[in-house]
Amino acid sequence: MAEDEVLIEVEAAKSVYGDDCLVLAQYPPHLNLLIKPRTADDSSQQFVEAVIGIRASSKVYQASKYSVNIVLPALLDEIVQ
């Protein structure tokens, strides 16, 4: 996959996740995504969230050349307390 195609995918992630997407590096891509229930911002219905880290090498689609990990798992009641 060419670098410009990868950059388009990074932009797509930013478009979908908005402020919940932190781009640490454009190429090779390294993103942190805040994942939480989509409840129209009704925080009383959001019980858990996690930050998912996605990092790839310049050979993005080779299975051994990327990693996905949970950076910060949390139950929201733990955060509030």
Image (spheres, rainbow, N blue to C red):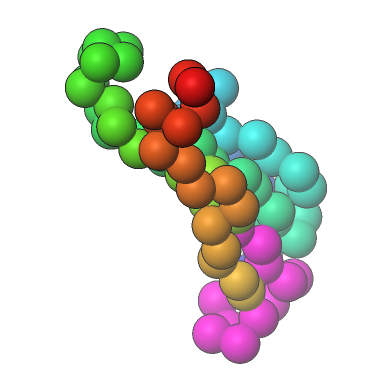
The image quadrant of residue 75 is top left
Q: Which residues are magenta?
A: 54-65
Q: Position of residue 27 (x, y in %)?
A: 77, 55
Q: Residue furthest bottom?
A: 64
Q: Is residue 8 visible?
A: no
Q: Position of residue 77 (x, y in %)?
A: 39, 28
Left or right position of 76 against 21: left
Residue under the image location 60 percent in, 71 percent down: 67
In this rendering, the answer to whether 43 lies above or below 74 is: above
The image quadrant of residue 35 is top left
Residue under the image location 21 percent in, 22 percent down: 45
In this rendering, the answer to whether 74 lies above or below 39 is: below
Q: Position of residue 38 (x, y in %)?
A: 26, 27
Q: Is residue 77 visible?
A: yes
The image quadrant of residue 41 is top left
Q: Nearer the viewer, residue 7 or 50?
A: 50
- Image quadrant occupied by the N terminus: bottom right
Residue under the image location 57 percent in, 47 percent down: 72
- Queried whether the magenta region covers residue 72, the answer comes back as no
Residue under the image location 55 percent in, 65 percent down: 68
Q: Position of residue 62 (x, y in %)?
A: 58, 84
In this rendering, the answer to whether 18 lies above or below 9 is: above
